[in-house]
Amino acid sequence: MLTTSTRTTTNVIVWVEGRHEQTDAIVQQLYPDGMAAAIAEGLENHFDGPISIRTASIDEPEHGLSESALANADVVLWWGHKAHHEVSDEVVARVKRHVLGGMGLIVLHSGHWSKIFMSLMGTTCTLKWRNEADRELVWTVDPSHPITQGVPSPIVLPEQEMYGEFFDIPTPDELVFISSFSGGEVFRSGCTFRRGKGRIFFFSPGDQAYPVYFHSNVRQVLANAVRWARPDSRERDVPTLARFSEGWFESQVDA
Amino acid sequence: MLTTSTRTTTNVIVWVEGRHEQTDAIVQQLYPDGMAAAIAEGLENHFDGPISIRTASIDEPEHGLSESALANADVVLWWGHKAHHEVSDEVVARVKRHVLGGMGLIVLHSGHWSKIFMSLMGTTCTLKWRNEADRELVWTVDPSHPITQGVPSPIVLPEQEMYGEFFDIPTPDELVFISSFSGGEVFRSGCTFRRGKGRIFFFSPGDQAYPVYFHSNVRQVLANAVRWARPDSRERDVPTLARFSEGWFESQVDA
Amino acid sequence: MLTTSTRTTTNVIVWVEGRHEQTDAIVQQLYPDGMAAAIAEGLENHFDGPISIRTASIDEPEHGLSESALANADVVLWWGHKAHHEVSDEVVARVKRHVLGGMGLIVLHSGHWSKIFMSLMGTTCTLKWRNEADRELVWTVDPSHPITQGVPSPIVLPEQEMYGEFFDIPTPDELVFISSFSGGEVFRSGCTFRRGKGRIFFFSPGDQAYPVYFHSNVRQVLANAVRWARPDSRERDVPTLARFSEGWFESQVDA
Amino acid sequence: MLTTSTRTTTNVIVWVEGRHEQTDAIVQQLYPDGMAAAIAEGLENHFDGPISIRTASIDEPEHGLSESALANADVVLWWGHKAHHEVSDEVVARVKRHVLGGMGLIVLHSGHWSKIFMSLMGTTCTLKWRNEADRELVWTVDPSHPITQGVPSPIVLPEQEMYGEFFDIPTPDELVFISSFSGGEVFRSGCTFRRGKGRIFFFSPGDQAYPVYFHSNVRQVLANAVRWARPDSRERDVPTLARFSEGWFESQVDA
């Protein structure tokens, strides 16, 4: 019998850049304990099962993403915005290796332009934007998807930054949510991608100037996404190039 | 060398139900020669290459879709609305056989609820609607797709019926356009599907109460779609169940 | 907090046509208690969590698939072969309604030509075949997919009926397994499809002339598939066509 | 009317690394004029329409891929094997920019491990291999796809290097061919990917130790792929990040 991790603790790292919290009065007012704390609180309240959450930021040693930290993580959530270029290439390569080996990754909002997301997508990940408090409606287009369970369609976000198409990403493996904005633009706001052995979810709501991460539906989406992205095992298994002799599988032992 | 149909005539049937034209004053005013004539005119003006267009409607014998008519067609465009249930099951089965054998099919607007589309999709093909002259914006989300060439993003349709998600279709093979409406709804308005040997394109703009089929961008989309959906040959080749002996392909002659 | 069915019992119906067991000596020898019993035993042993399994067959009233039976089911597995045409259209329509409303469906082997599968796919579902004990190798091509967890790649089935391409199905939402046969043919042997609110998995190994359903890896795949296809709730919610006034979502209460 | 490039010359660059030709006696015997010449000859003979072909190799200045060379190209074919690491990062970035801006790219065989392919895919692009003259059968699984027109299924390649799953690529946008090998392995041997405005086709047959590029069916596939990957215009249009004011599209002029 396969023993899944269903009943074991899910280890999550909430990685938030953490610079806006240092200098931006609006962010300090909206998120007095920082954005990471709000995201973590949402997961605590909405995740169905035991969960252990660490937060990490760009200003910690190795950005808080050491080899051992990643080795213990099931899923990393990534929010960055104005300091993408300060994230070290070494740490990006390390995170990518863990994702390709099976770790889940949830990329939030302006993380669309992070080194890690661009490296995994292979495209420019560019988009249209306007930060003028458009109302965002998040519509479910895949109601059988686990990430959509327990949230209404649409989720109504009274104020958000507009992100509009064309969003230069590969065609998602699954398109889960499409957003519209009061200005008329649309955006593929909830997308899954499988890369290597890992599962990736991009979710676009979440600009720092609005209290998006306190919204209960957004929190439910993130909790669902953690459950969906979580691998069955913490053993990393990055695909490799290797020669195989004819008939190699005949000596393979059945599971 | 493969001889493609690039330089030969493309045969198209514009099938329009034709009932609104008989009784609806708005339609008669907008489309004095009928909707089929407007669609055909658009193809004549925008299709890049020789094209031969027939129109057909529900009130002709066999709905204008006899075996020989279909055998000579490369692509059928299908617009129906209030008489879906009057289309004979025999004709629907015939059209389906031709599509699975290679004929292109372009399903327009309220054709989402036609027997032929539902039969090819396997789902309810239901959606949300509101016919109150919402502005529709048609955004390109796949700019490398041939169907999007030569049209702006967004296409602006000042007035249209609202079609909203959840649209109960299988995940499209390619999602080409997403629409937003002034009321805030979104819709997967341009979708491709491959079924058997045939290519299918669904395009949602086109309610009879608005002059959508005179819009030059809409006409360009339909002309592009005909080019995309057109098979290389008019020979139908419906997949069949058959037994194959071991090594059958060794005697196959290379092309 | 979303209460998922993770810790509640999963209700499964193993539907096996049941005719070969009545007349075919090979099947009687391989499956002395019938194929349904072997499939059920595999689920009992490999499913991770509480599970309740009923078996049903074509010769029961309503083929054992009454409205109440389906209303209580989370997932139906479907194996049929020589009596597809005897399954009543009424029962097929009922099963389809439950699938579109959220029930999981796992279609096995010759079920590719069942009325329910063809109706949900919209294509001919035809393929090449040869029943001469080819060795089948089942290769994983989506190692991050939950259905592949705990099984080796390839699964080696010493003897099986050959099913070969072209398999006339819509492009799967996810292609999980590809099989090769000793005669050289290939087949998309593990495919997922989302239709309406329901999740469908097709898995091709399983001809009645071989002991495939006693193979531990095959049993693990089916147990994984039940877990994957199971909806979060037993409430059916078939998509419908409906008019929505402008701004209808503003009065929607957040979850 | 959209003026397509249908009747204008298609400009192709056949890029072949060119090192095996310098030192490997088998390659010199099989491809006395080099692999690039064989590929070019196949395109000349099988492409339907005017075509202009340049060849280029790693040992030319800028690897033969200067800005002006790429600006004039519609499609680049890429074959590399043992000198991937010698391709300059600057040239790789240049080719990637052109692909994202609309240029077609066809990646051949061992090009799966080229910098340009890995950068566009975001994964390790690793696979299983064995170079012992397995027979390769290339099966069509998408018979409506333009790349499959005019070739039999399977294409029989008497001897080829084995490439086997798991092939660590993103899920292809379209899976066109699946190969089996006499040793039993399978491989997704024909895959399309859309990235930015560009179309990419990966085709795995083509090890230097076998005369694959003289095979008429392989040549037909490559000619079809050039036609499919060719953009409608040579104007590059790489997606960019930009702010858009509310209502910006209202002043947009229709095409």
Image (cartoon, coloured by chain):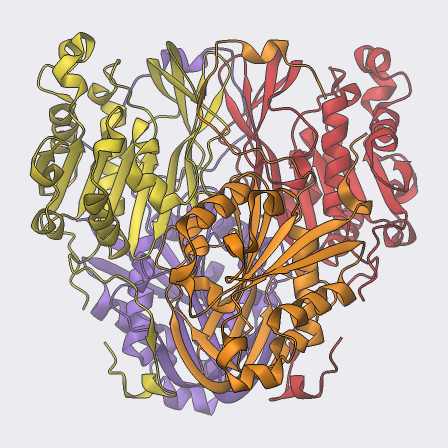
Chain colours: A orange, B purple, C red, D yellow
Q: Nearer the viewer, residue D119 or B134?
A: D119
Query: Where is residue A34, by image quadrant?
Result: bottom right
Q: Quadrant of the C terminus of chain C?
A: bottom right
Going by the image, does C81 lie left or right of C29?
A: left
Going by the image, does C16 lie left or right of A95?
A: right
- As displayed, is residue D137 above or below residue A221? above
- As displayed, is residue A133 above or below residue C75? below
**Can the viewer see residue C116 in this picture?**
yes
Q: Quadrant of the N terminus of chain C?
A: bottom right
Q: Nearer the viewer, residue C205 or C117?
A: C205
The residue located at (74%, 66%) in the rendering is A150
Q: Position of residue D36 (x, y in %)?
A: 14, 27
Q: Nearer the viewer, residue B232 or D69?
A: D69
Q: Nearer the viewer, residue A110 or D181?
A: A110
Q: Position of residue D191 (x, y in %)?
A: 39, 38
Q: Position of residue A120 (x, y in %)?
A: 44, 49
- As displayed, is residue C112 above or below residue A26? above
**Can the viewer see residue C240 in this picture?**
no
Count of marks overlaid on the render: 0
The residue located at (33%, 36%) in the rendering is D202
Q: Position of residue D67 (x, y in %)?
A: 11, 51
Query: Where is residue D138, by image quadrant?
Result: top left
